[in-house]
Image (cartoon, grey):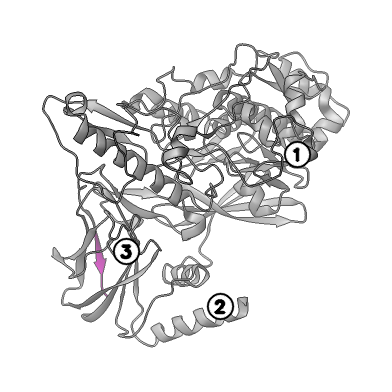
Amino acid sequence: MKTGVNMLVFLLLSLVSLAQEPIFLETESFENKGGWVIDQQSFVVQGSSYLMAHGMGRPVKDATTTVRFPKKGKYQIWVRTKDWAPFPKGPGTFQVKLDNQALPMTFGESGSDEWKWYYGGETNVQNEQVTVTLHDLTGFNGRCDAILFTNVPKFTPPNKLADLNAFRNKLLNLTGTVANAGHFDLVVVGGGIAGTCAAISAARMGLKVALIQDRPLLGGNNSSEVRVHLRGETDQNHYPKLGRIVREMDNGDPGNGNPNGNEYGDARKIAIVKAERNITLFLNTHVYKVEKDKDKVVAVVGRDIATNKETRFEGTYFADCTGDGTVGYLVGADLRFGRESKAETGESLAAEKADDFTLGTSNLWASLERDTVSSFPEVPWALPFSDEYHIDEARSDWQWETGFGNYNTITDAEKIRDHNLRAIYGNWSYLKTNKKEKYGKRELGWVAYIGGKRESRRLIGDHILNQMDIQEGKQYPDGTVTATWTIDLHFPDPKNSKYFEGQEFFAGTKHIKVAPYTIPYRCLYSRNISNLFMAGRNISTTHVAFGSTRVMRTCGMMGEVVGYASYVAKKYNTSPRGVYQEHLPEFMAIIKDEPATASKP
């Protein structure tokens, strides 16, 4: 099968090379992105980032770039896009302009919700340099991945992912052009609270650290792109040293979905990291490939989400703080996805049968009061609301959540986000039309287009934390992080299910209180990849236990522990498991902030 795919790609590229080399224009690389935003959340499905016109119902400013053509003449134009809400035609329409002249076709209204190439017609290029423009028509999340110019009249670019990736890499000259960032003691992948704390902790212990984040901001769900406040406590810790770095990251409690993004402390987080001389920070870098040798990670490769330049990071130790367990998945770490059965775990709160059910993803939103009355467009493509069922809120909270086993939180990330948007826009349109006395002067001030995930893969360590560990308060010799959050497992709100069965976007929960308990260090490293740590929501727990460990202050303390463990591992040239088996007293002394007697080498 692979041989056939490779032969097809070879034939396609050979056909194109007989004529002029085509021009492959990635939209995320546009020089001026205007009001369009970069979305990399579906890289695993797309093989690329793309630009999106996220205007909350108001057309965004044009994105423009300059293209140099090797020679004048006629070129066929192809545009890669999709109709994200085709009912029968969706809202995300846009135009492509060449030197301010729009192509005859309007994109994003095909009636098909699949990503594919659409023919944009033929143009006669008379200038060596041409300005290409993406012109948004609605502000409702039109999206464009790439534009292709070719002078082969009957050539159709590939749509299948394997063929497309080979085609893209060839034309962007990505094959064999990876820059080397050098060798690090610890490579931390994921710049949420867990990853950022891991990097700082290790750096302050003297390790050379690379911190890699796939967005322009640090903090993950606590950044201004997602706007979830920190939960879990640091002041009930058995070991008061843990939580100090978390408190540095903490910008107070702005609540969920605060319309003022400054409340989440983006600049502070980056400033704290950049002040650490042992950390090299790589923002906008999506790790999608791993090199391994037997049971060890050797290096990871990341692609810049805007420029597509690739960088390779070698390391002695690696920390998977991606939330999705991306590094672990790519390297073949043992993992779980979804719920275990009661028979398997013995947990009273476990499902009767194992399944792929996961907690969902939130896209929060907020409206603002204005001086004058405003309207909102009709949205027949959005979810329908009525007097009988609507959500009478001026701002969202955590309950706006989609997933619940209906979607895979990794491969369906775009669908989940889009379903959330259809719920937000549909409900808001209803409020603006039917509750004018309350919402007439309000308008959407902020809607998240980056999804705030709760659950996906969990990497398996030498210990799998379970419900009994939590509720019985078991104190293991390697107990480190003190966790305080309830067992908080979300499910579709029953009333929401009644009106939107199978399309739920609103959650409920039953908080099961727990006394402070400790998470064993053995939950923070992989059981079969010998140099891989993990911190955050992807650590080694059952689904039930995950309901308590997943909150961000707790995850941040996990990162701190990983930083200290990587120091001990490097000191003795051992593995994460070796820290537990051979140097636990010294490691725990660091956690306890006590003078340590060196372990026997």
Q: Is residue 69 magenta?
A: yes
Q: Label 1 crowding class (10 Å Cα cut-off): few <14, some 14-19, many 20+?
A: many
| Disc 3: which residue | 111
> Of 486 and 170, which appears nearest the observer?
486
Q: Determine which quarter of the picture holds residue 16.
A: bottom left
Q: Label 2 crowding class (10 Å Cα cut-off): few <14, some 14-19, many 20+?
A: some
Left/right placement of residue 536 relative to residue 317 reads left
> How far is the residue under mark 1 from the one under mark 3?
46 Å
> Of 11 and 551, which appears nearest the observer?
551
Residue 461, numbered label:
1
What kind of residue is marked 2?
Val
**Magenta region:** 65-70
What kind of residue is marked 1?
Gly
Which badge, 1 or 3, comes first in the chain's sequence? Answer: 3
**Dominant secondary-structure state across the stretch colored magenta:** strand
| Disc 2: which residue | 5
Provide residue 419's location: percent of width, then percent of height. Answer: 40, 46
Q: Determine which quarter of the picture holds residue 458.
A: top right
Provide residue 38's location: percent of width, then percent of height. Answer: 36, 49
Left/right placement of residue 39 relative to residue 590 reads left
Which secondary structure lies at badge 1? loop
Provide residue 596's location: percent of width, then percent of height. Answer: 79, 17
Which badge, 2 or 1, comes first in the chain's sequence? Answer: 2
Provide residue 537's location: percent of width, then percent of height. Answer: 60, 35
> Of 233 and 414, which appears nearest the observer?
414
Which secondary structure lies at badge 3? loop
Q: Is residue 423 visible?
A: yes
Left/right placement of residue 227 relative to residue 86 reads right
Eyeballing the image, is 258 above or below 31? above
> How far is the residue under mark 2 from the one under mark 1?
37 Å
Question: Which of the image's four quarters has the C terminus?
Answer: top right
> How far is the residue under mark 2 from the one under mark 3?
29 Å
